[in-house]
Image (spheres, rainbow, N blue to C red):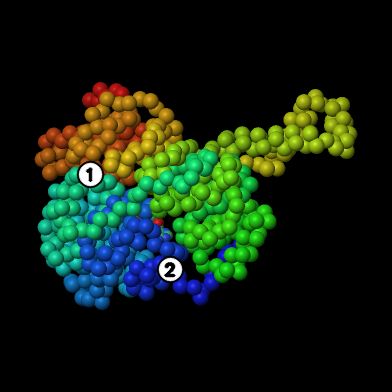
C-alpha cells in the first residue's frame, strides 16, 4: 500500500510567501500547490514588484521566475471590471509552448481571485483568441508576432495595461523579435510597470532595459558557491529527460544504482506525496518528508529511515534542512534545485566523512542552463549521462547476480543443494545446469520496461553565464553529441548575433513563400520553433528570395519540421515545404 503523508492542516501553508506581502488568497493557492518557501529569485523580485518598481532580472528557467513576476502582477488586476477595461497585464514570451505554460501558471495562482489569463500565439486559430479577448481577460500572455497582429487589427488594446513583462528576453531577441517588441511597447502607457527577465544579460538586452525600464531593481541570484571545506567526494551525474519520463527514469536509475540509502529531493510537497506513492507502488520502501508533517510524524519517518526499514526518503528542501542524517549513499534531485546554494546543500548529505557519494539530478531539457549555472557556480562538473537502457539495466542485474553468487559460494553450506546438481549432472552438462540456475534467478528479478526516450545535449562544456550554453538537441536516438561531424554551416541566423555554429548535419528546406508574401526571417523561425518545437538556436542560415525561402535545419529532424510546417500556415497561407532539391549541401 502506498503511504501518503498526512498534512498537518494547522500550519500556515506557505509562511515565507505571506512575509513577502502577497495576498492571502495567493498564499493559500501556493500552499495548495505544495510550494513551501519562495525561491531566491522570488524572494528578491516579489517585494520590489509589489512596491511598483521596475525589475531587471537575470534568471534561467527552473529558478521559479514565472511565479516571481506572475504573483505580484495579480495584485494590480481588476477581475470584476467590465470586459473592455479588464486587461491589466501583458506578458511577452518567445514561444507558443512558453505562452501556454505561463498562462497556465497565472491561472493556477490567480484562480481564487477570479483572474483570467489567455495565451495568444501564432498557429492557433485567430477566432478563438478573438472570442476570448472580447469576453474580457486580465492577463494576455503572447508571442510578439501574434500580439502585434492583434494590435494592428485593433483586437488587442493596450492603453490600460499596468504591467508589462518581457520573459526570456534574450530568446525573443534571438528569434528576431526586437522590432516587434519596440512596436508593442510603444502601444503601452508610459506610466506602466515593466519587468524584464532573461537568462543572459548581453549588451543588447541592457540596451532594451535602458530604454524601457525606469530605474529598475536588479535581481540576480547567481553567486559563486564553493562548498565550505574540502569538496566532498561526490560523483555528480545528470540525466536530461522530458517531464513525462521522469518517473520511469528515476525508477531505472534507482535500479541501476541500487542505493543503500538515498534522499530524493522534490520542489513541492505535492510532488513529494505523489512520488512517494508511486515509488511504493513500484515496490520501493519510500517515505515522505515535508513541511506539512507534524513533528511527531517527522520523528517517526526519521526513525524508520535510520533503522533501515525505509530505503528512500522523499523530501522537500525545507523538511530536509533540519535533518539529522549522518550519511546517505545517494542524493537524487528529482528536479534541478532552484539555486546553486540549494544544490550544494542537498548534495552535502552524501560523500561525508571521506566516503564516496553519488548525486544524481534529473533535468528537463529547458532546465539545461540552470544545470550549467550550477556547474559554473560550484566549480564542479556535473556529467550529463544517457539514461540507462533496458540492456544497461540487464547487464547491471547480471553483475549483481554474479556478486550474490560469489558471496553464496564463499559462504559455503551448499551440501543440501549438491544432490540436485548431482542428479541433473547425470543428464546435462554441468555448465548448462549452472547457467540454467542463473537464468532462473534472472527471470525472477526480471527486467522489464520500455526504453526511455533520451534528449541528448550537445557535447558537455562548462558554460559561463555570460555566454550562451549549448543548445539542447531535440529528438531521440543516438544523439548529435556522439557525431563528431561539424557542419560547414555558417550558423548565421536571422539576427546574425547570438547564434552558435551548428555541430550537426544540416538539411536545407524549401519553403514556397518569400518576400512577395511579406515573409520575414522571424516568421519562419517562429513557425519552426512553435510548430515543430525546435530550439531557435538549432536553426541555421535563412535565405529569403521573392518567391521562396531556404532555411537550414538539423538534418535529423528535417522531416518532422517539414511535416509540422505543412500542417500550419505561414503569413496566413498554406505553403509548399520540402527538402531543397538543389541541395548540394554536405557536411
Ligand atoms: P520556472 O523557473 O518559472 O519555469 O519554474 C520552475 C518550476 O518550479 C515550476 O514547475 C514551478 O511550479 C516551480 N516553482 C516555482 N516556485 C516554486 C516554489 N517557491 N516552490 C516550489 N516550486 C516552485
129 left or right, relative to 256: left
Q: Which residue is mark 2?
A: 14
Q: Is residue 535 positioned above or below 101 on the image?
A: above
Q: Nearer the viewer, residue 39 or 502?
A: 39
Tell me what residue is drawn at x 61 percent, y 34 percent.
395
Quadrant the C terminus occupies: top left
Up-down: is 2 above or below 252?
below
> On the picture, is 447 further left or further right than 389?
right
Residue drawn where x is 15% and y is 35% of the image: 544
Quick check: can you spot residue 268? yes
- Residue located beneath label 1 in the image: 202
Q: 407 or 245: nearer the eye?
A: 407
Q: In front here: 197 or 317? A: 317
User: Quadrant of residue 408 in the image?
Assistant: top right
User: Taking the image as four quarters, which one is ligand 1 found in?
Assistant: bottom left
CA gap, disc 2 to disc 1?
35 Å
Query: Where's residue 170, x and y in %?
Result: 24, 47
Q: Is mark 2 within 8 Å of ligand 1?
A: yes
Q: Position of residue 5 (x, y in %)?
A: 57, 65
Amino acid at each position: 500500500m502506498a503511504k501518503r503523508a498526512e498534512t498537518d492542516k494547522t500550519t500556515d501553508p506557505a509562511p515565507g510567501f505571506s512575509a513577502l506581502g502577497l495576498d492571502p488568497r495567493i498564499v493559500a493557492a501556493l500552499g495548495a500547490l505544495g510550494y513551501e518557501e519562495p525561491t531566491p529569485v522570488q524572494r528578491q523580485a516579489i517585494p520590489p514588484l509589489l512596491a511598483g518598481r521596475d525589475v531587471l532580472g537575470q534568471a534561467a528557467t527552473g529558478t521559479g521566475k514565472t511565479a516571481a513576476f506572475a504573483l505580484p502582477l495579480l495584485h494590480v488586476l481588476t477581475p470584476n471590471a467590465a470586459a473592455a477595461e479588464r486587461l491589466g497585464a501583458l506578458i511577452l514570451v518567445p514561444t507558443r509552448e512558453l505562452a501556454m505554460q505561463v498562462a497556465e501558471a497565472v491561472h493556477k495562482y490567480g484562480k481564487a481571485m477570479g483572474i483570467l489569463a489567455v495565451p495568444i500565439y501564432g498557429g492557433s486559430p485567430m477566432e478563438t483568441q478573438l472570442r476570448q479577448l472580447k469576453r474580457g481577460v486580465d492577463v494576455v500572455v503572447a508571442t510578439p508576432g501574434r500580439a502585434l497582429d492583434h494590435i494592428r487589427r485593433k483586437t488587442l488594446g493596450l492603453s490600460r495595461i499596468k504591467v508589462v513583462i518581457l520573459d526570456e528576453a534574450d530568446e525573443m531577441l534571438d528569434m528576431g523579435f526586437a522590432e516587434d517588441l519596440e512596436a508593442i511597447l510603444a502601444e503601452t502607457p508610459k506610466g506602466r510597470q515593466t519587468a524584464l527577465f532573461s537568462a543572459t544579460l548581453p549588451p543588447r538586452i541592457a540596451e532594451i532595459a535602458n530604454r524601457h525600464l525606469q530605474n529598475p531593481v536588479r535581481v540576480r541570484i547567481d553567486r559563486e558557491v564553493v562548498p565550505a571545506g574540502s569538496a566532498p567526494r561526490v560523483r555528480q551525474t545528470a540525466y536530461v529527460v522530458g517531464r513525462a519520463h521522469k518517473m520511469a527514469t528515476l525508477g531505472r536509475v534507482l535500479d541501476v544504482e541500487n542505493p543503500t540509502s538515498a534522499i530524493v529531493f522534490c520542489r513541492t510537497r505535492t510532488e513529494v506525496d505523489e512520488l512517494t506513492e508511486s515509488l511504493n507502488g513500484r515496490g520501493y520502501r519510500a517515505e515522505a518528508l515535508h513541511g506539512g508533517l507534524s513533528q511527531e510524524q517527522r520523528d517517526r519517518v526519521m526513525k524508520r529511515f535510520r533503522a533501515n526499514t525505509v530505503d528512500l526518503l522523499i523530501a522537500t528542501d525545507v523538511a530536509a534542512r533540519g535533518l539529522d542524517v549522518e550519511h546517505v549513499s545517494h542524493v537524487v534531485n528529482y528536479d534541478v534545485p532552484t539555486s546553486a546554494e540549494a544544490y550544494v546543500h542537498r548534495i552535502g548529505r552524501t560523500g561525508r566523512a571521506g566516503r564516496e557519494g553519488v548525486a544524481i539530478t534529473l533535468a528537463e531539457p529547458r532546465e539545461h542552463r540552470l544545470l550549467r549555472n550550477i556547474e559554473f557556480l560550484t566549480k564542479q562538473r556535473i556529467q550529463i549521462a544517457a539514461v540507462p537502457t533496458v540492456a544497461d539495466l540487464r547487464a547491471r542485474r547480471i553483475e549483481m547476480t554474479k556478486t550474490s553468487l560469489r558471496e553464496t559460494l564463499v559462504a559455503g553450506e551448499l551440501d543440501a543443494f549438491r544432490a540436485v546438481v548431482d542428479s541433473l549432472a547425470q543428464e546435462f552438462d554441468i555448465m548448462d545446469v549452472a547457467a540454467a540456475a542463473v537464468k532462473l534467478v534472472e527471470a525472477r528479478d526480471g527486467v522489464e520496461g520500455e526504453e526511455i526516450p533520451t534528449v541528448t545535449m550537445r557535447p558537455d562544456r562548462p558554460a559561463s553565464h555570460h555566454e550562451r550554453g549549448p543548445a539542447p538537441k531535440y529528438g531521440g536516438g543516438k544523439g548529435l553529441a556522439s557525431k563528431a561531424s561539424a557542419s560547414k554551416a555558417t550558423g548565421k541566423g536571422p539576427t546574425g548575433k547570438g547564434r552558435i555554429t551548428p555541430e550537426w548535419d544540416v538539411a536545407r528546406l524549401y519553403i514556397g513563400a518569400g518576400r512577395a508574401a511579406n515573409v520575414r526571417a522571424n516568421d519562419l523561425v517562429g513557425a519552426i520553433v512553435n510548430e515543430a518545437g525546435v530550439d531557435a538556436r538549432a536553426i541555421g542560415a535563412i535565405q529569403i528570395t521573392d518567391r521562396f525561402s531556404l532555411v537550414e535545419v538539423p538534418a535529423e529532424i528535417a522531416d518532422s519540421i517539414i511535416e509540422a510546417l505543412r500542417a500550419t500556415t505561414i503569413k496566413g497561407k498554406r505553403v509548399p515545404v520540402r527538402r531543397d532539391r538543389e541541395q548540394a549541401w554536405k557536411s
